[in-house]
Image: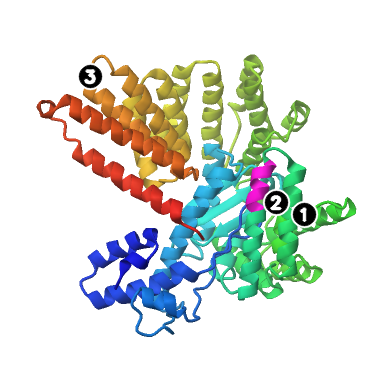
């Protein structure tokens, strides 16, 4: 078969799999199936408000030119059914590529909220619900700084939630209902079972959504107008989920909630909130909530959801899931997304522990450190009965105090506040991130590298962890310039490599390639200058850089 006729990114992918194959016939069959998917699979996506979907693998015959280009004997060759082993294998690879591409595009354009504690809480919820329906863990959860109500789940494992979803909810159970609904769409494969006309229309929608993301940073009205244009085109092509899809997602979602320990009755309660917002927007001639645009909320659906919820046991107000954690999360997101005033916080703090914590942090951000300290003092004797709520409270109190101490330049205090919780909960990402910030300020660069390396190995898309790795190597390079030239040069190279990794996951492919070329040039010049007497072997490092260059080039060529 002639690999020269294949696209370069796919050619590298095929070649690597051919090497792994013991039988050439199996390799050819693999290439035929994979190239068919690579060339023709339409990939609808949701970004910032509408569902990102992967289509079912097409079964129509490929054209004779494509067939002959890769050595087909029969130009009417078609893919295996999705239920077959081969179909699942191809689908998994398609979804992985889609998930990674989506992360890179979201990293480039979406207004992400990078708060490790908030992300820890939402990841725990999303992972718990996903585990009830799917054996594959999600790839990532993205928290979008957007006041609208929305959540999404992309084949490939990327999940997302808007800050507005949490802020407009009244309990953690209601937040769980939105995520459970999206997971149900995934588990029931609603994203894939659409006709070709619908998939083409949704591809039109993607362009509008990407433009809306870019426009939202400068002009919210312009972004809304762009999004409405793409939504209108999509709705005209009947892109919204069907009523049967919605009913099934509601039914399965409630089951997932119950299995995960959340109150299924929260789903119709949150639907009522959505319905109220919809009615208000219609009166104001405003845009509909983005969740409604793709998840039609009819009166029949509301009634059926309520009737189904009544079949579950009633949960009392005092038995809601993680009430303190929700209170802390809601008010923290309000402060971080600038959706609250000092007056709002002072009024709510009289009855809300979450508002008191948020007020203390808000005072710190304003440089009013004595007032922040006074609010923190009020929180120290808070009585908490739930073990889960107590862990969330204790960690957030330490993080908030540590962040305010850092604002004052007292990073030793930050370190002393966070270290006990890092030792107690070594699996938590939020404590690691703040501890790394403190160590960067305290000159403990090797400790930062040791702390962050496992994170970037398990979450290679983690731009915040990658940045801390980059910064640690930069500071290590400058601190060793006089005492150890070799260590200084290697640190500089690694700083460039981690900068490139961060640029990759932010969709800045050309910048990543420039960073890697700079790293390669630095290795080559240092190796040449030091000579063989230094004992420095540049080949492993150059091989790693070449591999990273190939990864960036492959990502750059992806065109869903």
Q: Which residue is mark 3?
A: 484
**Residue 43, visible in the rendered structure:** yes
Secondary structure mostly seen in magenta is helix
Vertical arrangement, residue 52 with respect to residue 462, above or below: below
Q: Earlier in the sequence, mark 2 or mark 3?
A: 2
Span of residues in magenta? 209-216
For residue 542, side relative to residue 304 (left or right): left
x then y, percent, for residue 178:
64, 57
Q: Earlier in the sequence, mark 1 or mark 3?
A: 1
**Residue 262, visible in the rendered structure:** no
Question: Quick one: quadrant of the N terminus?
Answer: bottom left
Q: Residue furthest left?
A: 533
The answer to whether mark 1 and mark 2 are in CB contact below 8 A is: yes
Q: Secondary structure at mark 1?
A: helix
What residue lies at 45% left-to-right and 26% top-to-bottom?
437
Vertical arrangement, residue 397 with respect to residue 133, above or below: above
Q: Which residue is mark 2?
A: 149
Q: Quadrant of residue 220?
A: top right
Q: Earlier in the sequence, mark 1 or mark 2?
A: 2
Q: Secondary structure at mark 3?
A: loop
| Residue 261 drawn in magenta | no
x then y, percent, for residue 488:
28, 23
The residue lying toward the viewer, choosing from 446 and 9, is 9
For residue 137, side relative to residue 396 (left or right): left
What residue lies at 37% left-to-right and 19% top-to-bottom?
443
Q: What is the distance, in whole Å, between disc 1 and disc 2 at their CAs?
A: 10 Å
Q: Which mark is residue 273?
A: 1
The residue lying toward the viewer, choosing from 552 and 299, is 552
Front label number (1 vs 3): 3
Front label number (1 vs 2): 2
């Amino acid at each position: 078969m002639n690999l020269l006729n294949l696209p370069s990114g796919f050619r590298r992918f095929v070649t690597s799999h051919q090497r792994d194959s013991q039988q050439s016939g199996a390799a050819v069959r693999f290439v035929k199936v994979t190239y068919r998917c690579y060339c023709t699979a339409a990939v609808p996506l949701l970004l910032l408000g509408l569902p990102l979907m992967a289509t079912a693998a097409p079964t129509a015959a490929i054209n004779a030119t494509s067939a002959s280009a890769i050595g087909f004997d029969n130009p009417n060759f078609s893919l295996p059914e999705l239920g077959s082993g081969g179909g699942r294998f191809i689908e998994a690879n398609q979804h992985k590529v889609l998930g990674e591409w989506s992360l890179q595009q979201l990293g480039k354009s979406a207004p992400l909220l990078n708060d490790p504690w908030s992300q820890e809480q939402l990841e725990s919820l999303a992972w718990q619900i996903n585990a009830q329906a799917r054996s594959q863990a999600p790839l990532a959860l993205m928290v979008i700084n957007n006041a609208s109500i929305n959540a999404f789940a992309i084949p490939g494992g990327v999940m997302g939630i808007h800050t507005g979803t949490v802020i407009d909810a009244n309990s953690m159970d209601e937040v769980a209902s939105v995520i459970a609904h999206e997971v149900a769409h995934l588990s029931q494969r609603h994203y894939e079972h659409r006709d070709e006309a619908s998939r083409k229309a949704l591809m039109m929608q993607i362009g509008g959504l990407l433009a809306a993301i870019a426009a939202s940073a400068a002009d919210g009205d312009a972004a809304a107008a762009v999004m409405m244009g793409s939504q209108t085109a999509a709705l005209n092509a009947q892109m919204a989920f069907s009523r049967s899809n919605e009913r099934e997602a509601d039914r399965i979602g409630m089951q997932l909630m119950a299995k995960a320990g959340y109150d299924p009755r929260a789903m119709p309660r949150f639907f009522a909130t959505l319905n109220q917002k919809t009615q208000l927007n219609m009166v104001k001639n405003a845009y509909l909530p983005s969740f409604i645009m793709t998840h039609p909320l009819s009166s029949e659906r509301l009634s059926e959801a309520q009737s189904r919820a009544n079949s579950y046991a009633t949960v009392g107000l005092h038995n809601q899931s993680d009430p303190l954690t929700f209170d802390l999360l809601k008010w923290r997101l309000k402060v971080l997304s600038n959706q609250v005033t000092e007056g709002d916080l002072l009024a709510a703090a009289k009855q809300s522990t979450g508002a008191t914590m948020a007020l203390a942090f808000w005072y710190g951000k304003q440089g009013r450190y004595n007032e922040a300290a006074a609010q923190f003092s009020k929180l120290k004797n808070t009585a908490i009965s739930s073990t889960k709520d107590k862990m969330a409270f204790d960690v957030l109190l330490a993080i908030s105090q540590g962040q305010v101490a850092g604002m004052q330049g007292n990073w030793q205090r930050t370190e002393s506040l966070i270290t006990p919780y890092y030792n107690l909960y070594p699996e938590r990402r939020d404590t690691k991130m703040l501890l790394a910030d403190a160590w960067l300020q305290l000159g403990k660069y090797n400790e930062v590298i040791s702390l962050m390396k496992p994170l970037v190995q398990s979450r290679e898309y983690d731009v915040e962890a990658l940045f801390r790795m980059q910064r640690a190597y930069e500071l290590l390079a400058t601190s060793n310039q006089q005492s150890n030239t070799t260590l200084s040069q290697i640190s500089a190279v690694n700083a460039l490599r981690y900068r490139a990794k961060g640029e990759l996951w932010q969709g800045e492919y050309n910048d990543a390639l420039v960073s890697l070329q700079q790293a390669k040039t630095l290795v080559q010049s240092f190796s040449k200058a030091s000579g063989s007497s230094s004992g420095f072997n540049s080949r492993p490092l150059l091989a790693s850089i070449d591999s990273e260059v190939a990864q960036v080039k492959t990502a750059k060529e992806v065109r869903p």
